[in-house]
Image: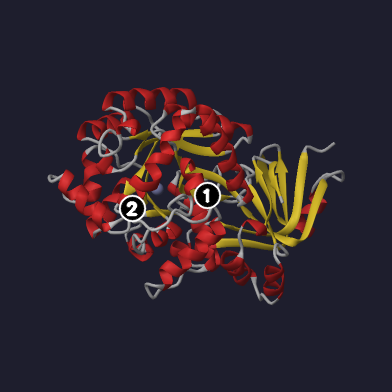
Amino acid sequence: MSQLKAWRAAIVHCIADPKDVGIDAAYEYFEDGLLVVKGDKIHALGDATQLIPTLPNDLAIEHHPDAIITPGFIDTHIHYPQTDMIGSYGEQLLTWLNTYTFPEESKFSDKAYARDVADRFLKELLRNGTTTALVFGTVHKVSVDAFFEASEVHNLRMICGKVMMDRNAPGYLTDTPESSYKESKELIDAWHNKGRLHYAITPRFAPTSSDEQLKLAGKLLSEYDDVYLHTHLSENKDECAWVQGLFPKSKNYLDVYDQHKLLSERSVFAHGIHLCDSEYHRLHETGSAISFCPTSNLFIGSGLFKLSKAEEHNVNVGLGTDVGGGTSFSMLQTMNEAYKVIQLQNENLSPIKSLYLSTLGGAKALRLEGKVGNLAVGTEADFVILDTRGTPLLESRLALSKNIEESLFVFMTIGDDRAIQATYSAGQCVHKR
Ligand SMILES: [Zn+2]
């Protein structure tokens, strides 16, 4: 028996940022492609008719003539504890947190409750073709244990962290600078780089952390080579004004994090909507990344992310759902809303750039390129089979499509979890529709 497994279908993946090389050179497309997996890694990729003669005779080939294979999607900002509060009505950020988020997050002191939500959350990600995510826990240490234990079951490449929050939140949800440092460190030692898991130091956002807590978060970040920093930045105008009032000595919002040594090549800031030039510049200079969360930015009424500004300053950008402020677990639907956010600024977001942001761009933002993000030989076999017959409308619309770019654009405009035929993580099937 050969150890190899192969999938034959149309295959598309990004190999560079369209901004750097132009759209045509940014992706590879095989109309009749073959993806060959050995164990948990990609062994070969190319035209089926050319590759098949080079492979063992007993190779098992799964043929999907009505499918397109893409890399697994990467969600660079999401809150697993907010799974059950998606679609909460009528508030903007600060009241939304107090009205909906904090009461729900209080339930995660119960590990059994947290594990139940984590299991359902991961199932929802996999149904939507998302194989890697940068995930908020709650202030409770057990919320992160529960999440990582659930992720281990499916051998997923996941990043998570315990929220650090010691002020401007209900007493039942706050920690202290010392306890947040100690518990985060214990979680790093228990989980970081265990299998495919990674830890992110996770202050919720500047308003809910004291100077002392942010200082200890910076100290913790400096104590490890490759731990992540994950927080929110400049999402909502009232929030920005509040931050200025709380940290009067800071030059701008980002400077609060900068002064506490929280900018790094593994720092990911969600939203970054209301930034000035010097903030983009500083993000670039430190190798920090922004997670662009269009469904959330529209739903909570936060504003329009300026992708062209981030590009102009060479800031790494990934795409995020930000569930439960975001309204869909689907990265296809997130690309749909991203397109509209860019349209409202009289610019276009090409389908290849969208694919890039949700795969290789996300991997680059998370410094995981070479491991996940595309289908290059030697990378981990995280991929998605998109079904061109996922819905009657997809089938009829895609029949008229003239090329792969148009097909991708149709998937990202009218596709959702019904378009995901199967999801694979490290070569294993983790979802089949
Ligand atoms: Zn968020």
Q: Residue 373 vs residue 101: left or right? A: right
State the residue position of label 2: 93
Q: CA distance from mark 1 to mark 2?
A: 24 Å
Q: Is residue 239 left or right of residue 308?
A: left
Q: Nearer the viewer, residue 166 or 44?
A: 166
Residue carrying label 1:
74
Q: Residue at x 66, y 76 (%)?
A: 402
Image quadrant occupied by the N terminus: top right
Residue 351: which quarter of the image? bottom right
Other-residue count near label 1 (Cα within 10 Å), few / some / many at <14 / 14–19 / ≥20: many
Callout 2 amino acid: Leu
Task: For mark 2, give the secondary structure.
Answer: helix
Q: Residue at left 47%, top 23%?
A: 190
Residue 123 at x, y = what percent?
A: 61, 43
Q: Are marks 1 and 2 in contact (CB under 8 Å)?
A: no
The furthest residue to the right? 57
Compared with 220, 204 (above or below) is: below
Of 343 and 1, nearer the camera is 343
* Residue at screen point 41% across, 22% down: 186
Q: Work out whether 318 lies above or below 21.
A: above
Which of the two marks, 1 or 2, is nearer to us in this view? 2
Specify the farthest residue to the left.
249
Q: Position of residue 404 (x, y in %)?
A: 64, 68
How dense is the environment of label 2, judged by Cα within 10 Å: few (below 14), some, or many (20 and up)?
Answer: some
Q: Residue at x 61, y 59 (%)?
A: 416
Q: Quadrant of residue 367?
A: top left
Sequence-wise first label, 1 or 2: 1
Q: Is residue 68 left or right of residue 312?
A: right
> Looking at numbered disc 1 in the image, what kind of residue is underneath it?
Ile
